[in-house]
Amino acid sequence: MWRLLKYFFISLLVLVILVCASIGIVLNFIFTPEKLTPIVEKSANEFLNAEVHFDAIELTFFSTFPEFGLEMRNGSVVTKVFQDSLKQENVYTATDSLMSFKRCRLIVNPMAYLSRKEVIVKELRLEEPQIYAYIDTNGVPGWNVMRESAEQDSVVMVETDTIQEKLIESIDIRNIRIEGGKLVFDDRANELYARLEGFGLKIDGNFMERKADLQLDVKAKNILFWQEGNLLVKRLRFALQTGMRLDRDSMLYVLDKAVMRVNRMKFGVGGRLQADTLNRLLDVDLTFGIKVPSLKTLLDLVPETVLKHDENVTVSGEVLCRGTLKGKYGKDRVPVLDARFKINEGSVKYAGMPYSLDKLDIDLEGVVDLQKEQPSFLKLNRFCVKGTDVDVDLNGRVDQLLSNPLITASVKADVDFSILPKIFPIQEGVTLTGSLNAGLKGNVLLADIKNKNYGKLDIRGGCQLKNVLLASEKDSLRLRSKSVILGFGTNMEDKTILQEKNLLNGIFGFDSVDIQWKNALTFHMDTSYVKVKTSPLRDTTAVASMSADIRFGWIDLVMGDSLRFRMGNSTANFALAPSPEDKKLPLVKAKVNMDSLRIRARGNRLRLANAGFDLSGVPDRKNKRQWLASGVVGFKDMRVYTPLFPLRMRMPGTKITLSPGHIKLNGAKLKMGRSDLLLTGEVYNLAGAFLRQEDLKANLKVRSNMINCNQLMKAMEVGAANRMNMKWGTEEELSEDELSDVDLAADSTYVADSTMSVFVVPPGVDFTFETNIKKVLYGKLELDSIHGKVVMQNQCIELSDLSMRSMAADVKTTMLYKASGKEKAYTGFDLRMDDIDVGALINFMPSLDSIVPMLRSFDGLVDFHMAAETDLDSTMMVDLPTLRAVAYIDGKDLVLMDGETFSEISKMLMFKNKERNLIDSVAVDFRIKDGMIEVFPFLVEVDRYKVAVGGEHKIDMTFNYHISVLKSPVPFKLGVDIYGSMEKMKFKITKAKYKNLFIPSKRAKVDSAQINVRNQIRRILQSARE
């Protein structure tokens, strides 16, 4: 017996292994995704009036054991309902995209098909679908994609020569799951739009039967709803669980024991839906309500963080909550919503509490008809709360709910807040004191508030809060105010005006307010008030004129470590009037005076003393949310610090004129570190640059006594790094290392070329300066009397016809500097220097010593002109292989000093004075290209000799010069070739190459090169703009 069982189990194991191996071979080698995907796609496109696509389709077994499954990844369905059937090609629009999904899995029963030819889908699961339910203006839905043949019969037939054979007897879909989806319902026929985020759906039951009993579970984390472009609902959480009886023959859907949750409210729902396919209508008849056994059920809805849930509470009163949704849904048809909520003769008494709530009456009703065939309104017939030292009576209504809401309300209230903890079991650690006395009536059109037409508001009465304290130890919250007063008067008699009635007048004031919430918020305000007065209307279609006088006490606001706002005593006057261009648009004028203002945010600091503003603003006609402001801002002293330009900046008494999109400066003084500026001109898009990282543009005339370029360049370098940190979301303030860099930049002993590096012009800057500067410090250079044009744009600096005085010489230059990164830079320039000492010339351009080493042998004044372009390395040194230049040096009465080259020559030629020899004049022309310096022949008269010199000098400091001796003690002309290097110099006697003293003028080459450099500057700027 044991042996038989052993053989049986071994055979069974072998059989299982063979079956699993066979299934594995079938799944991995026969029904592969590459073979299966096009077959399923083709079948789906034939079965549906849509274009269906999948990235991959895989047949599964082991992951869905013991059933087979079909898994589709990254699928999409595009409806063809709105396509022209006569056209050969389909042209799709965004509204044709019916659905896309990340993954779809179907679990099927293969035995049911093999035995009975039934397709039984045990589960259909969609993950992260994006569903777009679109109805066009004719009421045609885009999701009706079942072809007519498929709708008439779900049985698939195949016809042979003699018989018809059924491939599928029936299709049974039993469970449907949708997870993490997004559903958009866009009904263009009725101008309705809804978006359901976090959408989920569960349907259990035989979905495909003609008559079926289903279990339906729908949920959405957030619902937004628009009607005719107006947002009516947002931040609404929804869930529905219900049974549903489905009759496909009569298209009747009956809800059974439905439970609906809206945010924290739970409703019961019942009723029926019946479709009319001929007229494309859906007849809706639903009733909903809340089953409230007692008032305690509503008290339990109050969050426990506010009110303890106590079972020992005595309640009385009748609660009613019900509503209906009735009507037809289709083209130009929407059901009407009618709802009512009532609490009659309610009362609440908690055990152990000394006082009770003696009376609670609420009567609220509303009707919403989106088709506007009947008035839509929300009406509060009664809201009455009475108890010990608590008396609140409120009623009102909102008419024209869907068009232009008109709010009418009346409030009477007398409340002692210290009584509330003695009526309700408020959470421990919560302190509430103070009193409220209010009596208000209002008749307000919501459009007047939206259009800033406050003068037309009809509000009367007043409200007063005394000694209010709200504190919560658990939430670390504390709010205190000694007194708050609010008073309004409207349509009061006034015999001094033509209409004999005044419009809205009011006052709002308080005596100190203190708010503290954890370490995130601290707020304090001293005694302040606002007085409002409205002028009589002359034109009822125009914005009503209104004025307000405001006084603010000391204000101190701290929000964690990110923001600190402090403002001293301030007064303001605001005026509202019709705009001259459009009387329906408000024109706001404001005059503000403040003792002081200090703001600190994310490392930025601003301090104003004795500041005043005289501004006016009007909404933009195209975008009414954007205001166009203009006016004057003035202050006695302003100090600014920002990580984007980490130098302390100060502006003494200044007035700034504001216009839409730009500000105007007229003699504004600005001190930045050790630099000072007097600015006149305009700055554009200042707000966009600081708030939205847009381009900042300026066109200014600049006067200055001193500009320290070393300090400014270092500050811009650090600021560019900080700008990148802010762009990537870094919110920390400057580190200690960065602060030390800024301190170094502020040190007057710091010179740029001691740690010279490429200066990158910040992006987003478009500045044009007309300069008149007395002194500029750049590296070790001191430049005086600077006049000309400077342009900073597209990370380039352009100097146009700039004149200055440097090293006791006159300098004129045109230059372009461009650097997009720290690795290298480009510069092109045209430089003229007159009557400059040779030693000062070498100090001004240190690279010139390497380019023309013979200059070290001269002493005296020369004229220097050079046109060049070159790349600069990361240390701002000339990259000699890229240097292209032509130049000339003119000098008279020069002194030939002892130098490395000419010392050897003086010994060889037996000069009378080997230390110092006068030269009447010298004019040297040279060209630099491809690392080669070509010195054109020039004439030199020194000692007893007249010689012509020319040759070449290479970057590796090797040279090859020829000297033609034209006049000497010897009676004949000769030549000397000097070549080699400074360490191994060689020479030989040759024939004189320049014996006729024919030296061609190369000045035309310099002038031509100057034009080429200017053209190159223009090309670089143009390419940068593009």
Image (spheres, helix red, strand yellow):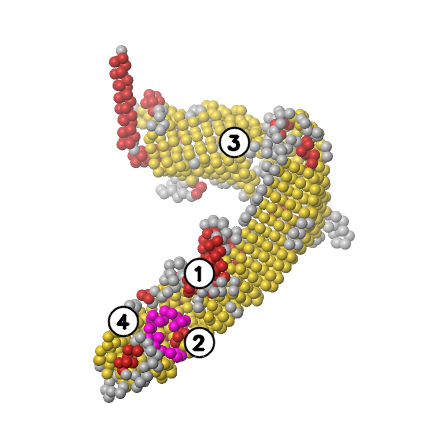
* Residue 761 quadrant: bottom left
* Residue occupying the point 26% across, 19% down: 10
Amino acid marked by disc 3: Ala
**Which numbered disc flags the more N-terminal residue, 2 or 3?**
3
Is there any visible trace of residue 249 in the rendered image?
no
Q: Nearer the viewer, mark 1 or mark 2?
A: 2
- In the rendered image, which residue does mark 4 sit on? 983
- In the rendered image, which residue does mark 2 sit on? 809
Q: CA distance from mark 4 to mark 2?
A: 35 Å
Q: Nearer the viewer, residue 137 or 943?
A: 943
Q: CA distance from mark 1 to mark 4?
A: 43 Å
Residue 394, relative to residue 352: is it above or below? below
- In the rendered image, which residue does mark 3 sit on? 239
Image location (x, y in percent) of residue 485? 70, 45
Few, some or many C-alpha atoms within 10 Å of disc 1 (few <14, some 14-19, many ≥20)?
A: many
Q: Nearer the viewer, mark 3 or mark 4?
A: 4
- In the rendered image, which residue does mark 1 sit on? 761
- Residue 935 included in the magenta stretch of the image: no
Label 1 element class: loop
Contact between labelled residues 2 and 1, with CB atoms less than 8 Å apart: no
Residue 43, relative to residue 492: is it above or below? above
Q: CA distance from mark 1 to mark 2?
A: 29 Å
Tell me where the magenta segment starts and ends, as one range.
842-863
Amino acid marked by disc 2: Ala
Label 3 element class: strand
